[in-house]
Image (cartoon, rainbow, N blue to C red):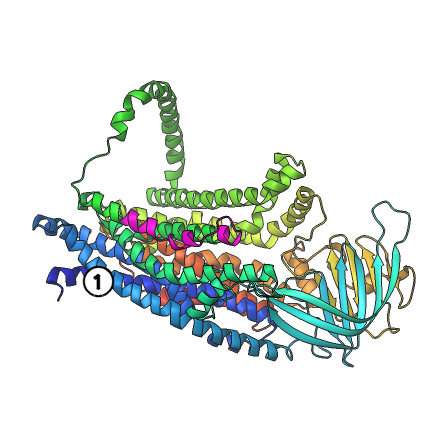
Amino acid sequence: MPTILTRYILRRWTVPLLGALVFYGALLLANEVVAISKEIFTQGAAMRWLIPLLLTALPEILGMVLPMAAVLGGLLGTQQMMEGSELVAAQGLGAGRRTWLQPWTILATFLLVLATLNAHLLVPAASQYQQHLKTRMAEEAKSRFLRPGGPPWFPPGSPDSAFWVSPEGQVHIMESTPQGVQHLTAASMTYAVETGADGSSELQLRLDGLNGALYQPPGPGAASQGSVINLHQAQQVFRFALPSGTRLLSPTPLRQERTPNLLRLSRAPLGPGQDPLAWKSTRLQADMELCRRITLPIASAALLLLGIGLGFGHPRFYKGGAILRSMGMIMLYYIGMKYIENMWIGEKFKTPVPLLLIPFPFLVWGWFLLQQRLRPHHPSRVGLRLGPWLAPLRSRVTPALEWWRANETRMKRWIHGKGTRHGILRHWSTLGWYRNWASALGTLLLLNFLVEYASLAGDLSKNNVHFYVFMDYWIWNLPPFLAIALPMAFLLGSLLALSEGALSREWLALRAGGVSLVRWLWSSRVAWAGVTAFTLLLQAWIAPMATSRANRLYREILKRSENVSTTRPWLYLGSTGVLWKLEGEQRWGFPLKAPGEAPLLLGWRLGEVNSEALAWGGLHMVQGPPADQLFPERSLRNTPSAEEASTFDLFHWQRWAPDPERAYMLWSRLLGWLAGPCLVLAMLSFAFPGPRQGRGQALGAGLVAGLLFLGLQALFGGAARASEIPATWGVLAPLLLLLSVSLLRLRQLRT
């Protein structure tokens, strides 16, 4: 039987480990909900498939969550014992390295056995059943879209194509690409969903008896009117890749195979008549899936030891920040794992041994960290050794620092002298909120700049585009990003400001002076109300105007007319029966009528009085109907796309061409400013850490809440854009959930 001390240490590690299991499990579960719902919406299936598919994904989520929970559980449990000086007392009684390794061995063995059984038994069985459910879902989805007389259908991942089935059963295929614009009709259609060797799903539409035409517009400055090619085909197959949501570890195509089958596939020789590329891909995927099932359970034990080593220390040097440090270790492990797996798929090395060695550096790191932390604490000697080398630099920097301090003092006197006219409390709380909000927003802007530049650096160099063009694009592209960043900065700035006052005892002094929490929050109303008003102004008016300029600069960087719209570039006017493809200044119209009842194709450019028309069987474009007849509303003729339309014009777009995607965009502009305040209300109970805790808990809770909120927005937004729920509920549902959380956690608010 384990000793009393061993059982006590196990209990102190197990309780936070279970909490971390729920914590990280909820994060991955929310991400999985978004990913599965995206697959459901793109296939046109019903929402009732969400729960069965989610249940079959639980074993795989558990396999990824156990290493995360292990590092956070070990770190939190050790920190709690460190905070209560229990570790110091145990060491004073003679507890050494064996005292901590024995409970780690017991807990690590349990995690190893649990994760191994889950990886080798539950995950393959659940994945196999999930594949069966997806096949049934695809069969059911056939009757939900492309029904006769229904609205046009736009294939997922293919913004240049559209399909429509007439009440008589005739299929219309409309497509606009750089190669030309075509409008075809087909007599019949068959539908199938296939899964490729790499695990990706593909939608196949087989059409029979096609008739129509392909129109190739003239180039810029050309004198010709373009060419028309009349098409008659017996059969044509359209393939569209079904997009899937992003996951921490993308599932391999062989995850439904049992472990003995994986061993057989990884060692199977090339058979006669077998494709060598397919054989090699199968072997690589089998080895990768097999190594995942072996290394993830070992990673649970390794990261548990690393978390214990990170949590060790002396009570005087307690720093907190367990969630942030555990997230750093988790990101380091999974990024390294993904990097080595990509090298294996790219055949950078010939043996799968590096895949099996992934968790062992973390195990060694945790061992040496534990060894170091068990020694008596001593200050770092790096500063003493570098002191003589830094003396010349310090002599040059000191005058500049003194000048800055003198000017900083004058500036602070001017600011505080002007700001205290409305009261010291209001001035102090406003400055504190602005300072923390600006630091959070600056961090998000810096991350956005790095990501944008990293994604476009190759195009800038290849196309010889100046860096100033990128800066111009980044500035004009900020409003769409700020629509997401401002609520996050609002939340993080508020949590940092409140937790800063709690840790510095300023909130204690305010309470002693009779200041309530509501009065403290209301005293900074100038700051947060101004940011809230700016968020509304940005989303409703500034962002639509900046989108047009940002799109033009983006096409200039890429040196091609690439569609950068984030919404569907189609406009269906039911009053005229024409489906329009929006391509900036140019529009192509496809009348949804039987051949002979209307032109085959319409073309119109913004600003022109009349359109051009191509008749069925015609050989060239002729003058078509006037623009005010095709577009009855002025806003439809003056704005290239819904993204660039002002909020007032977007109301008219919805009136003449109702679309769930544009409806969601409209209500997001009008109600998006509520996200920041609702997030703060939901997380208010985490904003006041204990006297011996740091701000890491508040910051970690804010980051997790922000990520969960973005996941909920993606889920309900996808349902609203797929017409599963009304657009208003797609925007309001995440906000109402936040308000519900704030009411439920009202009792946990300890100030």
Residue 703 sits in which quadrant? bottom left
Which percent across, then down, holds residue 98?
15, 53
User: Which residue is at 37% across, 35% downward?
Assistant: 416
| Residue shown at the point (90%, 59%) measured from the top left | 621
Instruction: Locate residue 319, reporting x and y percent.
Output: 26, 46
For mark 1, what is the residue? 106
Residue 278 lies in the magenta-colored region: no
What is the magenta range?
Answer: 342-366
Q: Is residue 311 left or right of residue 93?
A: right
State the quadrant of the N terminus. bottom left
Q: Is residue 728 visible?
A: no
Q: Main secondary structure of the magenta part?
A: helix
Measured as percent of width and height from the top left, residue 253 is found at 52, 65
On the rendered structure, is 489 left or right of 475?
A: left
Q: Quadrant of residue 407?
A: top left
Residue lying at 24% horizontally and 30% vertically, measured from the top left? 381
- For this rendering, which residue is in front, 577 or 198? 198
Q: Residues within 10 Å of mark 1 (few under 14, many from 20)?
A: some
Farthest bottom residue? Answer: 168
Kindly tell me whether residue 34 is visible in this rendering. Answer: yes
Q: Quadrant of the C terminus?
A: bottom left
Name the residue at the left extreme.
93
Left or right of 366 on screen, residue 483: right
Q: Amino acid at mark 1?
A: Ile
